[in-house]
Amino acid sequence: MKIWINTILNASGLIIPAVISLPAMGYLARSLGVEGFGVFLLLFGILGYASIFDFGLNRALVLYFAKNQNDVKKDSTLFFTGIVFVWIVSVFVGLFVFCFSDQIFLILNLSDEIKVDAILAIKSLSVAIPLTLLSLVMFSVFEGKQLFFELNVLKIISGSMIGLLPAIFVFFEDGIFFAILGVIIARLIVNVILAYKCLSFFDVKSLKWSFLDLKKLLGFGGWITLSNIMSLVMSGADKFFISNLLGGKIASFYISAMEMITRISILPAALAKTIFPYFADPVNKRKPFGFMYVGLVAILTFLLVPLFIFSREIFSIWLGENFSEKSSEIFHILLFGFFFNSLAQIPFAKIQASGLAKVTTLIHAFELIPYVILFFILMHYYGTIGAAYAWSFRVVLDFFLLEFFRLKMKI
């Protein structure tokens, strides 16, 4: 029962900001235009994908905070080591993006009409990336200690501000750069709040650097990073490949459909955040968890059927008539894969919480090359529809592989 309560808390931390940001996204789509909105989503996506540069420390910190059972001195050293390392890495990543913003613009194959605005927006990511990565480390404190009420109050504040401020900034000054500037200001405010809250959990004298702790974190996080990189190629780079090969305007329809998938990923994401520290806690290691599958299937069925039936109307109301037909067609295909991708969160969390991140990484390695080949073949013949089929096929296979190895290893 506690798992579902914590899942509901985690879902609320995602649902409330999502509901608040829906009209804001609709306003941005109409204000920035089809291509401009697509670019905003691409750049916003880059902030999410930048999480690979925490080298898995976010996940590793959740694991060790859960295992440490609130040992303040150990947690303090772990936190300080993790946040300093991530800050150093994130600054270098931000500088790289700033220096190569012109090249990124060319890779995205965007029109010259938005060149100045787009390049300025890309440069601004050099500030947004460090702020995003630091917030992930600070959120891991609450997640690892299973303080889900506090975590989701902060998530609601964070998500709501990040959803609303881009639209508010664009209202006063139209442009992709001002939309990203809204994200930066929101992240800055949230990070100040997070830093204040986090410090109350730690012993100031124990906030010190430890190479031993860094080695321990990277030992687990290294496999997470490899897995995340391959996941990025298989579930993130598709947008950039489509933009490069088919153009930013055509890519916008696929990106919008995938954005809707991201929005409805709230429930499986909430469950995943709940069960990872739950499985990592030694007390819960051998408890049955089949009820999680039953509950998740029931919730997904209730959610996905109306979304499938009314998808065209939803896209029309949300983003405008320009997106209704093409995006909804792609969305139908992605929904099938989403169902299995949601179920995959359970064996994925169980394997990683057992300290076997290597297994999930090897599974992703096995999937990578066949997926890339299938993606380009189907996209060549069927465009964005083919890309959607390739993604769905890959995530269905991923679920069955994860479940197969979980059963084989008797985890």
Image (spheres, rainbow, N blue to C red):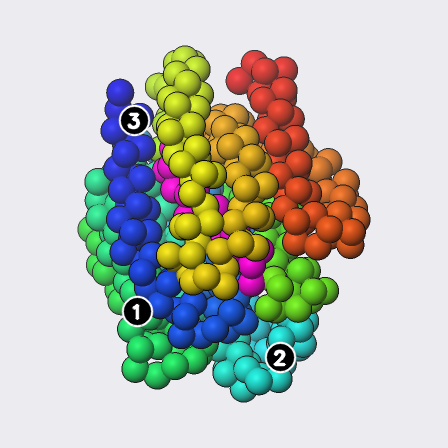
Vertical side of 124 occupied by 395: above or below: above
Residue 93, image quadrant: bottom right
Identify the residue position indicated by label 3 in the image: 4
Tell which circle, 3 or 2, labels the residue nearer the N-terminal end: 3
Residue 392 visible? The answer is yes
Tell which circle, 2 or 1, labels the residue nearer the N-terminal end: 2
The residue nearer to you, when weighing 58 against 85, is 58
Distance between the alpha carbons at the discs numbered 3 and 1: 32 Å
Labels 3 and 2 touching (C-beta < 8 A): no
What residue sits 39% from the left and 81% below the top? 174
Few, some or many C-alpha atoms within 10 Å of disc 3 (few <14, some 14-19, many ≥20)?
some
Identify the residue position indicated by label 1 in the image: 165
Q: Is residue 108 left or right of residue 331?
A: right
Identify the residue position indicated by label 2 in the image: 111
Vertical side of 230 occupied by 209: above or below: below
Few, some or many C-alpha atoms within 10 Å of disc 1 (few <14, some 14-19, many ≥20)?
many
Few, some or many C-alpha atoms within 10 Å of disc 2 (few <14, some 14-19, many ≥20)?
some
In front: mark 2 or mark 1?
2
Give the extent of the magenta segment.
252-271
Q: Amino acid at mark 2?
A: Ser
- Tell me the element at label 3: helix
The residue nearer to you, when weighing 100 against 218, is 100
Distance between the alpha carbons at the discs numbered 2 and 1: 26 Å
